[in-house]
Image (cartoon, rainbow, N blue to C red):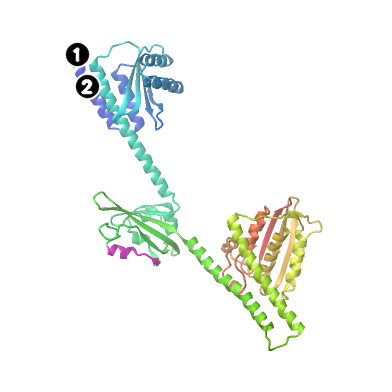
Amino acid sequence: MLSLLDFRVRQRDFLLEISKAITSRLDLNEVLKRVVNASVAMLAGQVGIIALRDDRGEYHIQAVLGVPKEQIPDLNTRLLEVIQTASARDSELVNTHLREMAAVIDKRLIQSFAIPLAFGGEAMGLMLVFRSFQGGATPDDIQVLQSFADQAAIAVHNAQLYERMNFDRKQLAAVIQHSADGVVILDDALTILNFNHAAERMTGWTAWEALGLKVDEVLTFAHVDKGDLHKALEKGWPYPDQQDADDALYVEGDLLRRDGLTTSVGIQYAPLFTDDGKLANVVANVRDISNFRQAQQMQNVFISTVSHELKTPVALIKGYAATLRREDVTWDEAFVREYSGVIEEESDRLTELIEDLLTASRIQAERGLTLMPGDMNIAEIARRSVARFQTQTDQHKFEIHFPADFPLVQGDETRFRQVVDNLVSNAIKYSPNGGTIAVGGTADGNTVSLYVRDQGVGMKESEMDQIFDRFYRVDGALSRKTQGTGLGLYLSKAIVQAHGGTIRVESSPGKGSTFFVTLPVS
C-alpha cells in the first residue's frame, strides 16, 4: 500500500507529465482535449467540461468528456447561471447550480469541482469536473489542482495565441493572393519569395516560375517614365542611414510581359527592416494603370477634338460676320441671306456641341437623365431624321422599313430624336463611299426595336466594347478626318438606358455596322 508521501510524489509526477504534454501542443482543440482528460484523471472523476471566455466576456463550452453533444446547449445555459452566481460571490448558490448541472448530465454524479483558468490576472475560462463519490480535498490537493490549472491556462493561452496568429497569417495570405494589385515579396537580395495571382496576370509569369528569380528577371521594363530601381540601389536605397532612402520607391512605365506584350504599370517598392535596422524584405505593389493611361489619352484627344470642334464654327461665324460688316462693299440681298444662313448653321452646330457637353456632365453628376415622357412615335421620328440627313448627302441611298402597325411607346421624344439623329449621322460619316443606309423597326408586343444599318467601314470586335464609352472614338484614318467629340454614342446609351432600354452594335471590318435600340412598350 502506498504511503501518503509516495502518493504525493506520484501525483506531482503525474502533474509534471501532463503539463509537459499539454504545453507541448499548439492546436487549441488538442490542448483542450488533453486538459479535460487530465483534470478528470487527477480527480478520479467521470465527467469533465472546459468553458472558455470570448471577447465579449461570455463563456461557452469548448471541450467535454463524458457528456453527450446534445446536452451541450442546455449546459451552456446552466453554465451562465453558475458564472453569474460566482460573480455575486454566493458560494451556496454556485454549488446549487453545479448540482443541477450534474443531475442533468447523470444523476449519479454527486460531487463537483470548479477550477478557474486565468492568465496574467485575466480570466480565460472555467474547468469543471464531476464525480460519483464524495471526497475531501486537502490544502495540498488544492495547491496541486491550482498548479495544474495554471499550467492548463498557459497552454490554452499559447494555443489561442497560435490560433490567432495562424488565422492572421491565412488572412494576410488571402489578401495578398486575391488583391487586385500585383504583390511581389522579395528578400534582402531582391529574390522573389511571393508572387500573387494579379502579378501572374500582369506579367505573364506563373508563381512557380517566378519564385527564386531576381526581381529584374521578371519585372522588366520596356520603357520607364519615372523612377529607377537600379539608380536608387546605387544611391543606397533602401537603407535608412541614407537621406530619404527609407521612403518607398515608385517606378512607372511599360512592363515587358513574358509573352512579349507590354502593360502600363506603377510599382511601389516598400522596404521592411528588422529591429536592428537590417533589410528583411522589399514588398513590390504592382498596379495596372493601362486604363488610367487610356483615360488620360482619351481625355487629351477629347480636349484637342473639342478645341478643334469649337474653333471651326467660331472661325466661320467670325469670318462670315466680318465679311458682312465690311463698309467698303455693298452686298446684295441674296449674298447676305447666304452668309447669314451659314452663320445660323454654325451657331446651331456650336449650340449642339455645348449642349452635348453639358448633358454628358449632367449624366456624370446625376448618374442618369431626367425625361419628359409622353406618347412617342419612333417610326415618325426616324422618317423625319432621314429626311433631314438626306439633303446632306448625294452618295447614300436611304431605306425605311417600319410595319404599318408599329406601336407608340412612352418616352421623351426630344431626347430620343438625339439617339436616332446620332445613329443616322454616324452611318453617313462612316460609310464615305456611299451605299445603302437602312432604318427600320420591329415589335413583339412587349418591346420595340429600332435598327440603323450601313455599308461602311465597320469596326473590330475590340472596338465594339468601347464605342459607348465617353470620349471614345474608333481609331483610324477615317475617324481622324470626321468631326466628332466621342460623346454621341455615350449620350445615346444614356438616353436609351433612361428609357429602360438597351443599345448594341453588330459589325465587322469592311462590312458595315448595325445598331439596335430596344425599348419596352410601356
Between the residue at mark 1 and the residue at mark 2, the CA separation in whole angstroms equals 12 Å
Task: Residue 452: name its quadrant.
Answer: bottom right
Q: Name the secondary structure under disc 2.
A: helix
Can residue 429 be found in the magenta stretch?
no
Q: Residues within 10 Å of mark 1 (few under 14, many from 20)?
A: few
Lateral position of residue 340 relative to residue 228, left or right: right
Farthest residue toward the front? 327
Lateral position of residue 392 relative to residue 49, left or right: right
* Image spot of residue 244 (x, y percent): 30, 60
Region rendered in magenta: 223-235
Q: Relative to the observer, which residue lies in front, 83 or 78?
A: 83
Lateral position of residue 200 relative to residue 503, left or right: left
| Residue 26 visible within the image | no
Q: Name the secondary structure under disc 1.
A: helix
Task: Residue 420: name its quadrant.
Answer: bottom right
The residue that disc 1 covers is 4
Task: Residue 411: name its quadrant.
Answer: bottom right
- Relative to 89, say whether 171 is above or below: below
Q: Amino acid at mark 1?
A: Leu
Q: Relative to the observer, which residue lies in front, 242 or 109?
A: 242
Q: Residue at x 45, y 62 (%)?
A: 263
- Assign the N terminus to one quadrant of the image: top left
- Relative to 97, say whether 244 is above or below: below
* Image spot of residue 457 (x, y percent): 63, 70
Residue 504 is tagged as none
Q: Earlier in the sequence, mark 1 or mark 2?
A: 1
The reply to whether callout 1 and callout 2 are in contact (CB within 8 Å) is no
* Image spot of residue 3 (x, y percent): 18, 12
The residue that disc 2 covers is 12
Q: Amino acid at mark 2?
A: Arg
Q: Relative to the observer, which residue lies in front, 96 or 106?
A: 96
Can residue 225 be found in the magenta stretch?
yes
